[in-house]
Amino acid sequence: MVCANCNDWRALALAQLSYTSTCTPKSCDFCKEMSIIENQIRDSVAALQSLLEKHQRKKEQINHVHSPIIQLPPEITSTIFLVLTPQDIWSDFPRHNERLSIFQPLQIGAVCTAWRQLAWATPQLWTHPFFDVRIIEKHHRHPLALEWLSRAQLVPVTLCITYGDSYYRSNPGANPFLEAIAATSSQWKTVSAHMPLNLMQYMFHHVRRWDNIHSFLLCPTEGRYADKNKPLFAEAIPSPRSITISLNAFTLDKVNINWCRVEEARMDPLSEEECIGFLRAHAVLESCEFVITNRSSNSTGTPISSVSQHRLRFLTFNKFSVTGSHLLSRLTLPNLVHISLKNKFYDGPFDSIKDGLLTFFRQSRPSKLQKLELVGFDLNLHGLKLLLELVPALSHLHLRIPRDWGDDNIENELQKDPFFCYLAATMQGPGLFVPRLKILELTPNIHRGDIQWNSVAAIVAFLYHPDSHSPPDRRPLKTFRFNVEYLQYEASPTTATRRKLYELTQAGAEIVIDDEVVVVSTTDLEEEEKRNRLGYMSVA
């Protein structure tokens, strides 16, 4: 198989050089002359074809010699390829120019024979095809893209296709490729698509099988007004198990699927009224994530009725505010296990959402609630204490570090913070205040700046006081998680901070930074102290 990336010569369409004579068997002089010319053309084409193939082989040999990755074991090389493969097109979708630099798995085989053989031997690559403008706009690459799909055969495929810029929206050259992709729908298990609404509708209208699809991740971009009034699918399709969909380009009523089996749903954006209606209409939902943009669009002025949902176990609200609090007060979710309420970019007053949250927890009484995330709100001890006493089974609490805390005076900030002081004071006898809390997760305010190692050590030391004589009802808080997303984390702690971290971990505390457990060994401490002594001696 010759790789499409190295086959730009095919654009010359050499096959068009052939000529078929229309003269009778008794050839005239012109036909004889034409025949001689045609023979010369065929010989030249054959010679050119041979030279192009030799050129291709030589390029592969050069790439093989100069590619250090080939010296690695195949399992490591394939892992590198898989790590580079695009995974998620839903969050933080890059701009067009940035997308051109995204790793394109289809181009692996264009480097050399060894890379191509490794790609064919790595099923995770060709069962997770990623098609973007570099494939869709290059017609000569379509056969290679379809060959990748054909290799999967009966293996379920996770299809990822991105065609997001409006500049490409009216390009008719994309339609044949989308039709060819739709013809492989019997292989699909997950469909992840970010493309103009009319092209998404066009591709889905050519799909003939839906019952094998488990998950949808759909992000249609703005389309024409006429497209917004059309259903997303040609006809109502069988229910998937999971669906994530952006509703910026059209409305939820145009998503014509049978919702009877949908267990996981992520919707962005919805009004308060739409969230209530969605939860009321789909009783089998187990997990929901909503982005609420405004209050109810109900123009009649009549209050929105409450909803009781007994199967929902996971609920997430992004951009949570007073609107979300108003919505929560109308929900009864007794079997909730995890609830996440987040404001990503700013901290709002906790008092503004307190009443709605208290109403929700009092009427729901979620006795099985294990995890509560309140990220993006200024902590308020009185309101938070009332709230947390309603969820005694809580084992995982996620909060945001106050934005006015500084790393230089972190100990003083902890001593002045009512919530952290109360949490520390009740470690030995928590009473009703999160008596089963095992994990405290903290996220810095995005406008605050970096969180440094000394702050991590100070927070853990302030809250974690192991004692061999602790009562049996002592709060089991031992795990401290710190998220430093979007921030530049300090690379190395000071010697004093490293020793404090070592003492805390030896005493039983587990410190996790971005999903990585902090491990400080005695060898590390000894080597660092030795380097410090040598540095001091050289200065002296």
Image: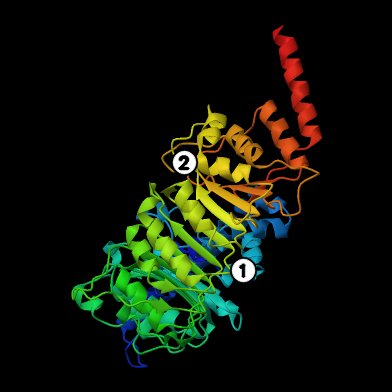
Question: Vertical placement of 312 versus 399: above or below?
Answer: below
Q: Secondary structure at mark 1?
A: helix
- Whether residue 40 is visible here, answered yes or no, is no
Q: How many marks?
A: 2
**Position of residue 513 in the picture relative to residue 352 (left or right):** right
Residue projecting furthest to the top: 540
- Residue 484 in the image: state x and y as whole percent: 53, 44
Frontmost residue, 284 versus 130: 284
**Which residue carries the number 2 mark?**
402
Q: Quadrant of residue 268?
A: bottom left
**Which residue carries the number 1 mark?**
124
- Whether residue 321 is visible here, answered yes or no, is yes
**Position of residue 43 in the picture relative to residue 509 (left or right):** left
Q: What is the CA distance from the residue labelled 1 to the residue labelled 2?
A: 42 Å
Question: Vertical placement of 29 versus 131: above or below?
Answer: below
Frontmost residue, 510 versus 211: 510
| Residue under the point 64% across and 41% down | 463
- Residue 340 in the image: state x and y as whole percent: 48, 61
Mark nearest the camera among 1 and 2 is: 2
